């Protein structure tokens, strides 16, 4: 997609919180934070970043697209793992500087590249006067090395 | 809180995704994205940023604290509105660069400064070939002008 995404400009909108104009705010790197939550359970599955192109692709195709800051490119969620997120609804917040996707996970239902259902599989607990992580619902639905190769990470 | 928050250093942790060490990654501005979701329903209520100090304060007090980028200061959620978020669990993601708070909203149960239950009260819809916002569960539980004064925003 070479054409720039087209959303409303924020200048000239008197009240960004109440307007029906969709004028998402991208940061200095041209990115906006995006949360994906399960449309049925509400559970937060992952967090990533979107460029205008990723947001436009998500809205147009109904499948979640993000921008990978490490790989510096548009990325369709599930392009190598098959773990596509079908988008049921796209919401934005009061300031229009965050995107919330309500999704139905496809594939094995593992949104996390580690093979878990959600990326949020550890909770912070006080232990011996410090903060430690404790697994929570951390079962793997796939083996990352089998899906992504030796690195266990998307290429 | 003048003392620096103490979390594990990321250097020397072989596998950040599987470790029990809590080594959150703060960005160049010293901030980490934080999502607050309702502990009972799973619903995403708001998104904000945390400094190490805000994260430490949240963990220590059990009430959500954030860092306001516009006001450039630590901010206890609900300090002026009374809409405190009691923190039931603090989770982090695979990369430890996002925080998820599972919370029980206090006060009137309006996490959004506009008086709504959630900041995500509008969905993006295709209309006349463009993208527009449509209200969704946008009822106000309080009047922002009555709570924050004329500006309708936290000072």
Image (spheres, coloured by chain):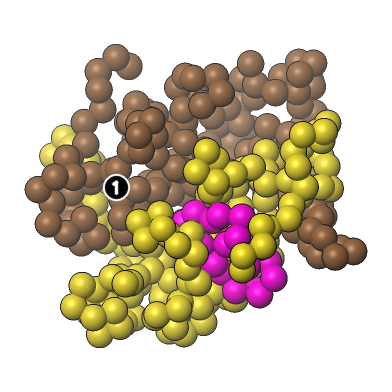
Chain colours: A brown, B yellow
Whether the magenta-drawn stretch holds residue B148 is answered as no
Left or right, A132 with reference to B41: right
**Residue occupying the far right of the picture:** A128
Q: Is residue B152 above or below residue A74?
A: below
Q: Residue at x 32, y 16 (%)?
A: A1
Q: Residue at x 39, y 80 (%)?
A: B81
- As helix, strand or loop, the secondary structure at mark 1 comes to strand
Can you tell which quarter of the image residue B148 is in? bottom left
Q: Where's residue A9, x and y in %?
A: 17, 40
Closest to the observer, B77 or B140: B77
Within 10 Å of the Cα at label 1, are there few (<14), some (14-19), or many (20+) other Cα atoms? many
Q: Is residue A43 above or below residue B126?
A: below
Kindly tell me whether residue B76 is visible in this rendering: yes
Q: Report the span colored magenta.
A: B45-66
Q: Quarter of the image containing the C terminus of chain A?
A: top right
Kindly tell me whether residue A116 is visible in this rendering: no
Give the number of callouts: 1
Left or right, B149 with reference to A129: left
Whether the magenta-drawn stretch holds residue B59 is answered as yes
Closest to the observer, B33 or B2: B2
Closest to the observer, B83 or B66: B66
Q: Is residue B8 above or below residue A67?
A: below
Left or right, A136 with reference to B67: right
Q: Where's residue B70, x and y in %?
A: 35, 56
Q: Where's residue B77, x and y in %?
A: 48, 72
Q: Residue at x 51, y 82 (%)?
A: B106
Q: Where's residue A32, x and y in %?
A: 39, 39
**Residue occupying the far front of the picture:** B2
Subunit of label 1:
B
Q: Which residue is mark 1?
A: B124
Closest to the observer, B62 or B88: B62
């Amino acid at each position: 997609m070479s054409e720039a995404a087209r959303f409303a400009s924020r200048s000239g909108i008197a009240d960004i919180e109440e307007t029906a104009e969709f004028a998402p705010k991208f940061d200095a790197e041209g990115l906006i934070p995006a949360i994906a939550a399960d449309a049925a359970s509400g559970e937060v599955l992952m967090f990533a970043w979107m460029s205008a192109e990723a947001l436009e692709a998500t809205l147009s195709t109904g499948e979640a697209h993000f921008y990978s800051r490490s790989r510096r490119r548009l990325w369709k969620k599930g392009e190598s793992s098959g773990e596509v997120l079908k988008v049921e609804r796209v919401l934005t917040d009061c300031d229009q500087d965050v995107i919330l996707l309500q999704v139905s996970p496809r594939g094995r239902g593992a949104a996390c590249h580690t093979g878990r259902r959600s990326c949020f599989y550890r909770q912070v607990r006080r232990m011996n006067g410090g903060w430690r992580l404790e697994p929570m619902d951390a079962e793997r639905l796939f083996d990352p090395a089998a899906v992504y190769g030796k690195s266990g990470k998307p290429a």
